[in-house]
Amino acid sequence: MDKQLFELGLNKRKSTLGEQYVTDNLAKADNFNLPFQEAMTEWCWGFGWGDDTIDAKTRSMMNLTMIAALGKMHEWELHLRGAINNGVSVDEIRSCIHAIAIYCGVPQGVECFRIARTVLEELELI
């Protein structure tokens, strides 16, 4: 493991998903999934998110559309919260969901709006 890349990834992961979520997630890791958690933190968050060529806000919007295309809605909700942490506005979230509906299908857009409404209401953003 590249310790520097892991630490960079850990910081990026915490700033996007929230320190409590990441700390809890890593604390629950065991011998079975800890190597995956470490590799994901190093590779996805350190190598990927650590590349500042694309800013965190833009990367979050890209992630929302890609994760929706994959239909991974638990991850989509998590990254929606991360996108908000990275400064994505309600209007930008709506526009992302419009693109999702156009390119992934209206039912996927409906699902994204349903999840977004729940999260945005919970955070008192709408």
Image: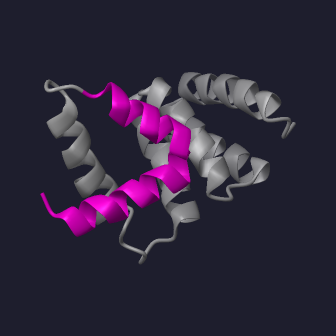
Observer-nearest of 91 and 101: 91
Percent from the top left, x then y, of residue 103?
Answer: 49, 41
Question: Quick one: which residue is furthest to the front in this view?
Answer: 27
> Which of the image's four quarters has the C terminus?
top right
Does the magenta portion include 118? no
Q: Residue at x 22, y 45 (%)?
A: 38
Residue 48 visible in the snapshot: no
> Which of the image's four quarters has the N terminus?
bottom left
Observer-nearest of 32 and 62: 32
Q: Is 73 situated above or below 10? A: above
Please give left or right for residue 58 compared with residue 43 in the image.
Answer: right
Specify the quadrant of the image occupied by residue 123: top right
Please give left or right for residue 15 compared with residue 49 in the image.
Answer: right
Q: Residue at x 49, y 45 (%)?
A: 65
Does the magenta portion include 20? yes
- SS majority, magenta: helix
Please give left or right for residue 91 compared with residue 65 in the image.
Answer: right
Residue 113 visible in the snapshot: yes
- Count of marks placed on residues: 0
Percent from the top left, x then y, of residue 96?
Answer: 62, 47
Percent from the top left, x then y, of residue 43?
Answer: 23, 55
Q: Residue at x 14, y 26 (%)?
A: 31
Specify the quadrant of the image occupied by residue 4: bottom left
> What colouring does the structure picture have?
one colour
Percent from the top left, x then y, of residue 70?
Answer: 37, 33
Please give left or right for residue 72 compared with residue 18 in the image.
Answer: left
Q: Which residues are magenta?
A: 1-29
Observer-nearest of 62 and 83: 83
Q: Residue at x 46, y 49 (%)?
A: 63
Q: Is 87 situated above or below 53? A: above
